[in-house]
Image (tube, rainbow, N blue to C red):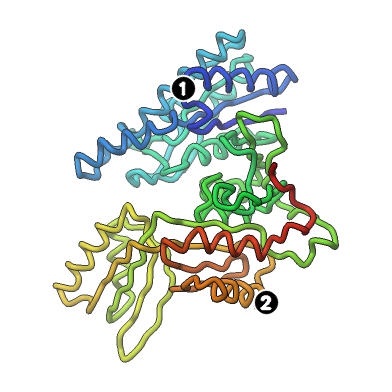
Amino acid sequence: MLVVLKFGGTSVANVPRILHAAQLVIDKYVRDGNQVAVVTSAMAGVTDQLNGYLTQMDALTEEDGVVLAAGEQVTTALMAIALTKLGHVAQSFLGWQVPITTSAQARNAHIVQVNAERIKDCLDAGIIPVVAGFQGLTDDGRITTLGRGGSDTTAVAIATALDADFCDIYTDVDGVYTADPCIVPTARKIYEISYEEMYELSSSGAKILQARSVELAMRHNVQLRVLSAFVDLPGTSVANKQIEMGAQMERLKITGIAHKHNVAKVDIEAMSMDVLLTLLENAIPFELLAQYGHDGATHIALLVEMLYADKVESLCNELKSAKQISDGVVDRNVAAVSIVGAGIDATAIQSIIRICHENNIPVMSLSISNLKISFVTTKPNLELAIFALHTALFPLEEKGYRVPD
């Protein structure tokens, strides 16, 4: 088979771990006769450190990509060295060397094209290509980065270009769980999940896979597997078909619970929705929570990452001074909870509202789709909300999920 492997930051956090990951590549894949391409992230914490330097500069420029892409340059070369030391020739590729062509958005570029000919040449020659994740270049040759978790998207894009049989994502957890095990010790591993549900979990805060990588895999039918780099256990498969759990599980419609804690809620009173265009023009990504009109005014509720909270607050003050909005309030003491499942219905909605009410968990905003129910609550109530919902929606006696030791 032809397999693309991606190793996350914790998997390559230092030289011993890089050597361990290289040994895993050889023992689990190469010795069985598989062709392998490897994608690496930066060492854990390095990208945050580099971003800290940019924060001190207090500017957003096209030079950001050059700084942020530096972390993957180190791990990619070290992984190639480690594989070669183990007796299997490897060659490193930075994004621009592949090349991986992207759009020009600073810190959040999207992949336009992957020219995989040099990678294919390596594979044909028995060389293991090791590709830097998270990075690419524009048509005019500027280095770009793909946003947090972007190495996942690099791996899926490489797998698509190579028509790989699998894309295995190695991380520090052994799969996708029904909730964060650090908050809910009885969270169950999900052994198979649909692309659609995985996308909803990822976009709602589950940090296992970048949402864009799942979207890309779904579009090109790339078979994803989430695995641990440290324990040899079955992971989670992300595929077209939803797992068959039998009659015992048919009534359980909820797949998992995700959350975002590093967010802010923005409430804007405006004359129209044009204020959203202003946010987009200022490169501020947001999630629209609610919008309704009253007495000739439009109330808009948004969720933004905490990274953008100060910028949004400043922009709201400017718009208020210019009489373009009547008010704009940024609340940083909030968190978002999302319940994801393929069969969200009125019964599920009623259950979630009842659980929150019984546990005195405030619900500040509620949005509903066929696959997801999301609500905003206060930050101090986040862990209680997750634990209470999981306890009620995933009772221990249900079959079909493995309870961790």
Sequence-first disc among 1 and 2: 1
Whether label 1 touches label 2, CB < 8 Å:
no
User: Disc 1 residue type?
Assistant: Asn
Give the residue number, with chain letter if any, for mark 2.
347
For disc 2, the neighbor class at 10 Å (few under 14, some 14 to 19, many from 20) is: few
| Residue 20 as seen in the image, left or right of residue 166 | left
User: Disc 2 residue type?
Assistant: Thr
Total numbered badges shown on the rendered structure: 2
Quadrant containing the C terminus is: top right
Figure quadrant of residue 368: bottom right
Q: Position of residue 334 (x, y in %)?
A: 39, 63
Q: Is residue 259 above or below residue 327?
A: above
For disc 1, the neighbor class at 10 Å (few under 14, some 14 to 19, many from 20) is: some
Q: Is residue 227 above or below residue 90?
A: below
Q: Estimate the spatial distance between the alpha carbons at disc 1 and disc 2, rounded to whole Å.
A: 49 Å
Quadrant containing the N terminus is: top right
User: Considering depth in this image, is 41 or 101 the residue closer to the camera?
Assistant: 41
User: Considering depth in this image, is 291 or 307 the residue closer to the camera?
Assistant: 307
Which residue is most to the left? 321
Residue at position x 65%, y 18% in the image: 26
Q: Which mark is residue 14?
A: 1
Figure quadrant of residue 160: top right
Q: Is residue 328 above or below residue 283?
A: below
Q: Is residue 254 visible?
A: yes
Residue at disc 1, secondary structure? loop
Q: Position of residue 352 (x, y in %)?
A: 60, 72
Residue at position x 24%, y 45% in the image: 60
Figure quadrant of residue 90: top right
| Residue 207 as seen in the image, left or right of residue 310 | right
Which residue is most to the front? 359
Residue at position x 33%, y 62% in the image: 332
Q: Is residue 142 visible?
A: no
